[in-house]
Image: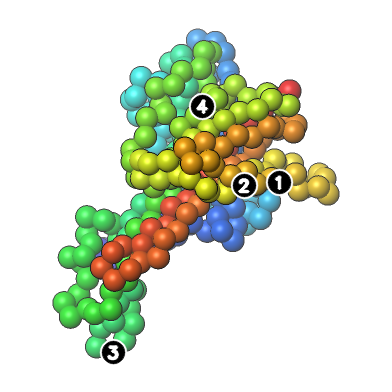
Amino acid sequence: MKKTVALLAFAAALAAPMAAQAHRAWMAPTSTSLSGADAWVGFDAGMSNGVFIPDHAAMRMTGLVVTAPDGSTVQPEHLMQAQYRTTFDVHLTQNGTYKVANVMSGIMASYTLNGEQKRWRGTAAEYPAALPEGATEVQATRTASRIETFVTLNNPTDTVFKTTGEGLELVPVTHPNDLVAGEAASFKLLKDGQPAADLDVTVARGGLRYRDNPEEMTVKTGADGVFTVTWPEAGMYWLNASVRTPAQGETLGSNANYVAVMEVLP
C-alpha cells in the first residue's frame, strides 16, 4: 500500500511541471541581484495561463534543489504549498550566483496485459523490471522537466551552470543576472548534453494582467543550440522550450521541457 501511494505521488509530481503545455509553469524570485554580507530571496511557484499570475494551481516542489556558488546544496526555508502557489525563501550567504531548480525525471509507459491496455509511471531505475510479466506492446517515454531561475549576491559567478547531460538544459552565454532592456542576450540549449538545434523558444514578459498586448515572442536556436533575445522592456521574463520524440518499438521516446525565469532591468 505504501509503495502504491508513493508511486501515485511521484506520478502526480512528475506530471505537474509538464502541464506547462496547457498551463505555464513558473518559479519567480522576488529579486535576482542583491548586495551585502547576506540576503534573503522569496520565491513564488505555480501554473497558470498568464505567467506569474497565481490563479490555477500551486507547483509541487518534489524536485527542488538550490545550488550555492561553491556547489553545495542549500536548504530552502519556510516552504509552503497553498491553493494557487507554492512559496519558499532562500538565505544567500555566499558571494556569487545561486541556481534554484525544480527538476523531475522518470519513465512513462503503456503496455497490454491480458488484452487490456495499462499505464505505468516510475523512475528510470525501476524500468523495465517493474512492468508485470506478460506485458506486451510496450511503448515507453523518458520524461525530463527542468524549471529554474538564478539569483546573485554581489558579483555574478558561473559555477552553477554545470550541466548534467539529461533533458533540456541552459548554458548562459550572457549571465542571466546581467540583463538590460534594449540589449541582446544569448544562451545555449543542450538536449542530453548535445546542442539542441532548431528549437523554438517562447519568451513572455510578466504583467499581462495590466495590459492588452501579451508581449510574447518566439526565437529559434541555431545549429549550435544558441539563441539570442533582445529584451524590449524591463521586467520578469519566462522562457520555455520543449522537444519530443516518439517511442519506436524498444527504443524509448523522449519528452523534455525547460523553463527559465529571468529578470531584465532598465
Give the alpha-carbon distance from disc 2 to disc 1, as whole Å: 7 Å
The kind of residue on which mark 4 rests is Val
191 or 41, nearer to the observer: 191
Quadrant assignment, res 65: top left
From this viewpoint, which residue is outermost toward the front?
A: 223
Q: Which residue is mark 2?
A: 202
Quadrant assignment, res 124: bottom left
Q: Is 118 located above or below residue 71 in the figure?
A: below
Give the alpha-carbon distance from disc 2 to disc 4, as whole Å: 18 Å
Q: Residue at x 60, y 57 (%)?
A: 23
Q: Which residue is mark 3?
A: 115
Q: Which residue is mark 1?
A: 216
The kind of residue on which mark 1 rests is Glu
Under circle 4, the secondary element is loop
Q: In the image, which is nearer the foreground, mark 4 or mark 1?
A: 4
Residue 255 in percent (x, y) is at: 42, 57
64 or 223, nearer to the observer: 223
Marked residue nearer the N-terminal end (2 or 1): 2
The kind of residue on which mark 3 rests is Gly
